[in-house]
Amino acid sequence: MTARNGSEPNRLERRKARTRAALVGAAQSLLAEGKLNVPILEITQAADVGMGSFYNHFQSREELFQAAVEEALDRHGALLDLLCEDIDDPAQIFAQSFRLTGRLHRLHPTLSKVLLNDGLNLANSDRGLAPRARRDIEAAAEAGRFDIRDPELSMTVVAGAALCLGRLLHEHPERDDAAATDQVAEDLLRMFGLSPAEAHEICQRPLPTVDPPRDGSAT
């Protein structure tokens, strides 16, 4: 019998949301490990939900994996927006977003690997880092902060730098991720027309603190 105050439907919705979140989290972990062809049964076992629950939320493994990538992109994009909302200079917004993204690889390894394993699709996505980087590059060019001829080509360079940097940091855990990321960001700023001194100064500015998740996962 449904409670008069609607608590039963609310519990049902919360249970459904938890089940969906468990499936997405399991998918993100599998994607991070490069396991793209696992049976749906393995996914549901990893999520600790029943097989029938899977089809209440997704029609296929591919649909789930797409949702897992999109939610990872949205989470990272929302974090960047929040941490850069008080900055007016588009050049600094670009630099800070890139520097924060570089630190993501050690702070959020599962999320990082989900994004990296999506490869070149990440650079063309309309979610997450890519559209924000394009927006900031174009804003900096319009404001006269960047001297660039083709924002789309500039975005291609940024995407390649971000992806390759992430791979490097995962393959070489002995590297200082902050120093490496700041150096790449500084080089990009110089390539976009800032003076060496200003590029260096911007990339040495303090960053807002980003706490890693307690379980080290993307969810």
Image: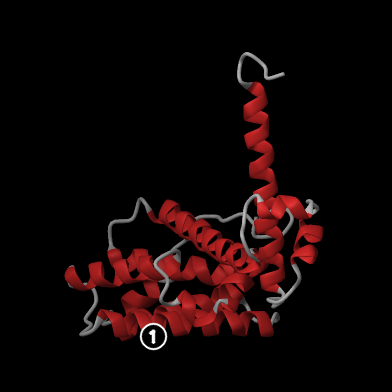
Q: Quadrant of residue 160?
A: bottom left
Where residue 60 appears, as percent x and y from the top left, is: 63, 64
Residue shown at 28% from the left, 56% from the top: 88
When the figure is inspected, residue 11 is found, relative to residue 34, above or below; the finding is above
Total marks drawn? 1
Is residue 195 among what the camera can see?
no
The amino acid pointed to by label 1 is Val
Q: Which residue is mark 1?
A: 157
Q: Nearer the viewer, residue 49 or 18?
A: 49
Q: What's the coloring here?
A: secondary structure
* Residue 213, x across and y down, in percent: 67, 54
Give me the residue at 52% from left, 62% from top. 70
* The N terminus sits in image quarter: top right
Query: Which quadrant of the structure image shows residue 190?
Result: bottom left
In the image, 199 versus 11, the foreground residue is: 11
What residue is drawn where x is 35% and y is 76%? 199
At 45% from the left and 64% from the top, the residue drawn is 128
Mark 1, Cα crowd under 10 Å, few <14 / some 14-19 / many 20+, is few
User: Measured along the vertical axis of the image, is residue 1 above or below residue 63?
Assistant: above
Say what secondary structure mark 1 lies in.
Answer: helix
Front residue of this view, candidates 32 and 199: 32
Instruction: Give the vertical position of 211 relative to 171 (above or below).
Output: above
Assign the C terminus to one quadrant of the image. Answer: bottom right
Q: Quadrant of residue 169?
A: bottom right
Image location of residue 79, percent across then percent down: 49, 55
Q: Is residue 39 visible?
A: yes
Q: Residue furthest top?
A: 4
Q: Position of residue 161 (x, y in %)?
A: 46, 83
